[in-house]
Image (cartoon, grey):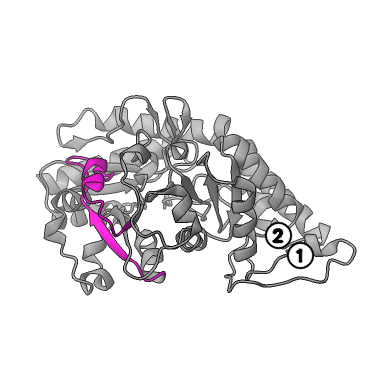
Amino acid sequence: MIPFSPPRIDDETITAVSNALRSGWITTGPRTKKFEAELANFLQARKVACMGSWTGGAELVLRWFGVGEGDEVLLPAYTYAASANVICHVGAKPILIDSKPGDFNVDMQSMLDRVTSNTKALMPVDIGGIPATMKSVQGELPNLISPNNAVQDNLGRPLVFSDAAHSIGAKINGTPAGSTSDVAGYSFHAVKNLTTAEGGALAFYNENLDAEAVYKWFMKMSLHGQSKDALAKTNSGGWRYDIDEHGYKCNMTDIQAAIGLVELARYENDMLRRRADICSQYDTAFGEYDWAELRPTPQGVESSNHLYMLRIREISEAQRDNIIDRVLASGVSVNVHFMPLPMLTVFARMGYKMEDYPNAFDAYSREISLPVYYDLTDDQVDQVIGTVVKAIQKVLG
């Protein structure tokens, strides 16, 4: 069976984790701080804060910006539930925006058109490794009315928070994709290009923010609001601390960071190149067939190639599901990204209707995600291609 997306775990990774365990320092410590510094350099960010997950970090971003009851956050209908869950967690309302026609990413102009006096944040999502936001949109946002806290008052407009969970390493005209936003959030989950098993990071880009002060706030609030982490408490008299806010628990550990440091060191010149090569092989092979709709890649964009999202022209959702069943039965694991939010019970119960987002449904209903991972061999790529082609031709007759 060819798996869908196993993590890259080799002797270098195992040695790094073993060294972290033997060091006796397994929670947030020197490896995490080093990982943050190297990520900031790689992402060209002013500061990076590592977290236990993208989700934990994203909720902290909304709470830091003062998003709460009565506020609205704009995001795509076509995304994973985590993007919307954090909005609901803080008591705000998700405002779903349809995808661009023929695309997976959100229509940014439609998102801008939906901004109201209740809008506190925009959350574009980079689906599959392709950036949703091609340029800075901050100058097109109106001033906030009745800011909720000092951070909102200082920024003076809705926050642009990029859900870049899929797109670390993606570029727009040579610059990191997330740098077009105020803050970008990255995921290091087990299936991501760059993994720490679980984990995430926040990259701060806005020049008007006090990056050091913001970083300290996120470090504090990721550890129950405690004024000192375990590393700081090793100093003389370090046992004494304070808690001045009700914080959360979503800090990254040094075990996670040990994996991340190995992955980051070989990411750009090794991992990204192999993923690009696999996706290029898929493009070449499926480009021969009229039924194949290949990944849309805007001019000037270098994808992180997190997903290879193949669409099949003029088929129904039921036919797509039949194709998937045949591919799986032939020994190749495939997936679907994603079920749009209105299709999920918890969001349908909130009143969202799939028929209001026709472009998102169209993209989802014809999509199959194919295996893309570092250790996938060229022979296995050929096997995936042959299996998928055979299954599609069988269903299409």
- Crowdedness of circle 1 by 10 Å Cα count: few (<14), some, many (20+)? some
Quick check: 265 above or below 337?
A: above
State the residue in front, 208 or 122: 208
Q: Which element is circle 1 on?
A: loop
Residue 75 location, quadrant: bottom left
Q: Main secondary structure of the magenta part?
A: loop
**Left or right: 290 with respect to 63?**
left
- Crowdedness of circle 2 by 10 Å Cα count: few (<14), some, many (20+)? many
Q: Is residue 95 magenta?
A: yes
Quick check: 246 above or below 217?
A: below
Quick check: 279 above or below 397?
A: above
Magenta part of the chain: 90-119
Q: Is residue 355 magenta?
A: no
Q: Are marks 1 and 2 in contact (CB under 8 Å)?
A: yes
In the rendering, at what x and y percent does residue 388 appear? 27, 43
Residue occupying the point 50% across, 34% down: 272
In the rendering, at what x and y percent does residue 397 appear? 9, 44
State the residue in front, 165 or 24: 165
Residue receiving disc 2: 28
Q: Which mark is residue 10?
A: none
**Left or right: 396 with respect to 150?**
left
Residue receiving disc 1: 230
**Left or right: 238 with respect to 121?**
right
Residue occupying the point 38% across, 36% down: 136
In the rendering, at what x and y percent does residue 325 appear? 25, 57
